[in-house]
Amino acid sequence: NAKAWNKKETMAHAPVFTEHSFDSNEFLKEKSSWSKIKRKLASDTTFNHGDLSPDFKKIRDEWLKIQSANEVEHFLKKTLSEYSKLSEDSKYFMTQLHPLISLRGIVWRARPLFEHSKGLLGNKSTHVSTVQFLRTAISSFKTILPSNQSDAVIQYFTEPSIDMTKKDQFQTITDFQNFMMSDYVPLLQDSIKKLEVISKNASDKVFVWDNKMVFGQGTFEDDIQRFRGHGVAEIHLTIASFYRATHDILVYCAYNQDYSVQLLGEIGSHLGVDSSIFASKSKDLGLTDEERVKLVKNAVKKHHFLELRNYQGSQYGSQLMKQAYVALKNSVVYADRSYHFLQGQESSKVMAINPLFVQNDSSPQLNKGLTNMKAVVSGPAEVRDPISGETVSLHLSAFYFNPPQSLGIFLPTQFETGEIEKSIKNKRGEILKVRNYLRGRSIAWDNNAWKSFVPSAEGKEPNYMAEARRTIQYSLGTSSVFGLTHLFVD
């Protein structure tokens, strides 16, 4: 099986990121300058057309003339090729868009993943749900942004270019994963590097964005809410978001996802129109946890679903996980820097982030959340539920540096028993039927599988992970960096 999988995939090299620390000497030097260059923008300050560089005005005007997907592609590639010649504000805004270059026709390229049906029902329900989701999203996008540029953007993502052929479409999820690693992630990585360079030289700068680029010609005639400033805090938060997106992709690509669409089809067939084929008086409506987990375990056993992609002795999946940890930690580092820069800053409605809403006095939960996030990514750490007072110990980095060979080990192992319906006798002697909604719910997990990443699970009762999930949920910020329990404990 490993040989078969290896033949199907092109093993792209894992990206390598530099791990940042919360208190590096370089950052402390940068931080010391903040007190001298505090963002002093009064609440009544406004930006105008004159705050944009001539270069960014030219780029904006070029964008507002775009009417087709080909022009979108040309615009993105042109600004990438001329990046070194761009002004600082143009570099900052355009490098955030450059990863989109690889996504031309991405919806069309992914069609075979949902259209190729197998078995009695195939993945019809998944296909229908996906089409409906896209139709709703695109219609809403067009309603909110009724411009020529929005038409071009819709065309850019949903239709192939004239240079594409059917060979450019993804036949398997592995094809899609390989595309993400070979085409999309390198562009994300390039943008991150450029944004980090910009951030080091922007402590005394504010880049002004023109919202007309989003809403199109004929908008903002009175310039109200048209311009928004981006300074140190916004730049750092942008870098954090790029690192987080990279983390999510790396984890997704580290594990075998090839059966995911078929699995969603199997689950959907029990929930949608096709569920009538499975329904009978002896079966409950919909799916219980037990039935859903049975389908997932079958995919794990028969189709290598959720298996670490270390095929033929390679360390490909493990390499992706290690770099995913670095990306996750870096995302927290930059989010923390953004937060601390804003402390003590005056309220400013013209900035993309108004400092008023992130002060520790007015929003103490933000500081607590960041404190927990920093502790967990730096861990091992203990987090506390402020409601119950219960604590859970976490070892997040172990999941990335010693990833399990299969994520299937985290699945529930026991489920609540009982009849589909319960009978209640009222005072008149009538028998009333009540659905037993708790039948089939997850009640136990393998603590031996979890203890490497949740050390406090060792020696606990089989239902301990449900308790751990609650604690992680209510411990501010923790679930945003430790999401395993939200995926496998429900």
Image: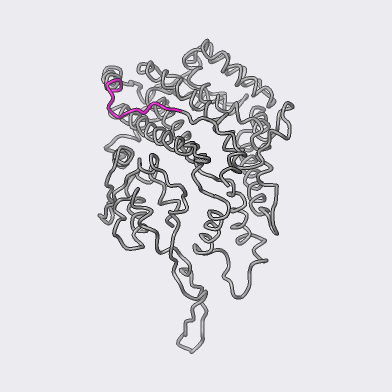
Residue found 64% across the figure and 63% down from its top: 275
Q: In the rendered image, which quarter contains the C terminus?
A: bottom left
Q: Estimate the x, y position of residue 477 in percent, counting from the top left.
A: 35, 43
Q: Quadrant of residue 197?
A: top left
- Reply above or below: 440 against 39: below
Q: Is residue 418 left or right of residue 78?
A: left
Residue found 67% across the figure and 41% down from its top: 171
Magenta stretch: dominant secondary structure: loop
Q: Magenta stretch: give its range.
A: 16-28
Q: Is residue 364 left or right of residue 142?
A: left
Q: Quadrant of residue 279?
A: bottom right
Q: Estimate the x, y position of residue 322 in percent, counting from the top left.
A: 41, 35
Look at the image and name its color scheme.
one colour
Q: Estimate the x, y position of residue 481 in percent, counting from the top left.
A: 38, 42
Q: Estimate the x, y position of residue 27 in percent, counting from the top left.
A: 30, 22
- Reply above or below: 488 against 27: below
Q: Report the front residue among 335 and 263.
A: 263
- Reply above or below: 423 against 414: below
Residue 25, magenta (yes or no): yes
Q: Report the front residue among 68 and 289.
A: 289
